[in-house]
Image (cartoon, rainbow, N blue to C red):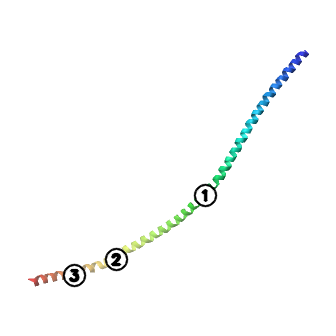
Amino acid sequence: MDQIVAILNVIGLISLIAVAVVVISFLLKAKSALHELMSTLRSMSQTIDRIEKDSKPVFIQLETTLQDTSSTMKSVQKQMSTVESALGSIKQIADRVNDLEARLQAKIEKPVMQAAGFVSGITNAIESFMAEFKK
């Protein structure tokens, strides 16, 4: 029976050694994988830092451009209200000029037409006189 116990002890120790070898092999592979993971993470961190550093000026310029655009739009809106006001004033002036024209035409047209008729009559009379005089 001692012999069986000794054989079982040897088999147990060999099994334990085999498990230890497997665990050591697994840990070595895990260590290698962790080193590769750490290297990849460092590389990613450096890439992210470089992207952040390179993109900062772009974002600053973008912000400045947006502020300038906003300022320009506000100025355009102010100018548009000024233009609308000026157009309203021009329309009022044009309406007044049209009204003045109509009033002047009403007051001047009749006397001018009478004067034109009078001049036409005198011209016809002179032409008739000259025609008779030439005969």
Check if mark 2's residue and mark 1's residue have beta carbons within 8 Å.
no
Say which of 8 and 45 sits in front: 45
Q: Quadrant of the C terminus?
A: bottom left
- Name the spot of residue 70 as percent of width and height, x first: 57, 61
Callout 1 crowding tier (Cα within 10 Å): few <14, some 14–19, many ≥20: few
Front disc: 2 or 1: 1
Q: Quadrant of the N terminus?
A: top right
- Name the spot of residue 124 as percent of width and height, x first: 17, 80
Q: Provide the residue designation for mark 1.
A: 61
Say which of 86 and 110 sits in front: 86
Q: Residue at x 13, y 81 (%)?
A: 128
- Name the spot of residue 100 as percent of width and height, x first: 36, 76
Earlier-in-chain disc, 3 versus 2: 2
Which mark, by number, is residue 119? 3
Q: Provide the residue designation for mark 2.
A: 103
Q: Residue at x 89, y 15 (%)?
A: 3
